[in-house]
Image (spheres, helix red, strand yellow):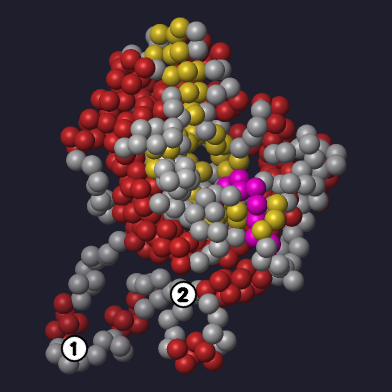
Amino acid sequence: MSFAELLTQEQVQQIHDASLEILEEVGLKVRYEPAREIFKQHGCIVVDERVKLPREIVEKYRKMVPPTFTFYARDPKFDKTIPRDSPVIVTASSAPDIIDPVTGQERRAESGDIARIAHLINELPGYDMFSISTLADDAPADQFTISRLYPALKYCLKPIRATTTDHKDTLSMMRMAYIVAGGEEAYKEHPFLTHHYCPTVSPLSMDNLSTENVMYFAAEGLPVYPTIVPNAGLTSPMSMAGTLAQGNAEFLATAVLMQMVKEGTPTIYATLATVADMRSGAYTSGAIECGMLHMAFAQMSRFYNVPCGGYIGLTNAKINDAQAGYETGMSGMGGVLGGMDMFNIGGLIDALKTFDFAKAVIDDEVAQMMKRVKHGISFGPEDLALDLIKQVGPGGSFIVAKHTISRMKTEAVMTKLADRDARTAWVKKGSMDIQARAMKRVKEIMTTHTDSLLSPEIEGKLRAEFPGMVSGELKPIE
């Protein structure tokens, strides 16, 4: 598939050169002392917390980033490698709130909600990976992350993306993963968690906790990648070109640090770039400019021969309405055409603050359409169908041709939610809108294949290791 390009090759080079200038002349404020020491050991200029990266150092280490990244699953049949398997569709993550599937009202999300979402994502075919969609308000004070991870592991066999707070939290998460895998060695042979952080905080700063975690996982050889989050007008220049230059510098700095920790560490050029609505300062993750920036960053990733992805196909809508649909659709399609490999697209509304079950199911159908676009148009020996066209001739019909019958279930996406009936048939079926149809599908999924995916033995070991852990039970939606 050929990709759409917003930038000329000259503009791509301009951004690269501008980023090198930023890193060499401005540098970054690096709060984590061991990171400053790593930079210093590898030839960077360190004065107090300011680190400046000479361009020859950046060029040397950025070329060490591998061209692929693999998401491993507990069941290897769900393993995905980008860019080969792109687009990889991932849920958007870490929303504090949820639309209650029974009352329809917004409330704080809990661990039981994560159990339901994990099962939903495990069953929906468009999703490739579960990035834990919400927080868990019922988590015990010292079990913040494992209260989210446990129900995810209990009901999802696909790759899971997780994050942690501090290093103590990270070690607790890894103990849980080792128990589920059958031991540390077994886990490291097939690490089914992908770790994600935002160590580089715009503008041009590296924090303590996320930077420590990224360095830890890079050193351990476990899957980890960072996301850069410049917000034009607030944390980056109020121009997309300036935001691209700064954001690209932030990616390069983080990627270089990872290579300095361990050469050949895979990573992803991952972004959540936006242009602020300066009328209010609103975070506009649903804006078309968010899609444009992602398309441009995808071009930069190809310049560096690194897989890319990010939070795209999002919405600022407060309910699952037409705004949610067009914001998701426009930027999502832009990302596919622009060559993005990974999409954190599913299930969230209100600028990443709230999970909605119906939106997740609708986004699954959107994901299948995106994959169809990426699959492209086949030009095999029989696809042009010249002999058939000659045979049918003017005024004929293709409906009973073997060529039609053999392709009628594969050439087009067989939608299950999008309504294509005549109005009379739609009325006869209850005149349901897509929100109602999606919730009907959610409730059906919550009644099938709902057994725990963890054995009683593993459950017992987890409960012994983490006393007082949440139940993580999946309950039907009634």
Q: Label 2 crowding class (10 Å Cα cut-off): few <14, some 14-19, many 20+? A: some
Q: Secondary structure at mark 2?
A: loop
Which residue is located at x 17 percent, y 92 percent?
395
Mark 2 and mark 1: Cα distance apart in space: 32 Å
User: In the picture shown, does residue 182 fall above or below 336?
Assistant: above
Which residue is located at x 36 percent, y 72 percent?
412
**Disc number lying in front (2 or 1):** 2
User: In the picture shown, does residue 271 fall above or below 434?
Assistant: above
Q: Amino acid at mark 1?
A: Val
Q: Position of residue 20 (x, y in %)?
A: 30, 22
- Residue position for label 2: 418
Q: Which residues are magenta?
A: 90-101
Q: Position of residue 66 (x, y in %)?
A: 39, 32
Choose top left, top right, bottom left or bottom right for residue 398. Answer: bottom left
- Residue position for label 1: 392
Which residue is located at x 33 percent, y 21 percent?
22
Which residue is located at x 85 percent, y 39 percent?
467
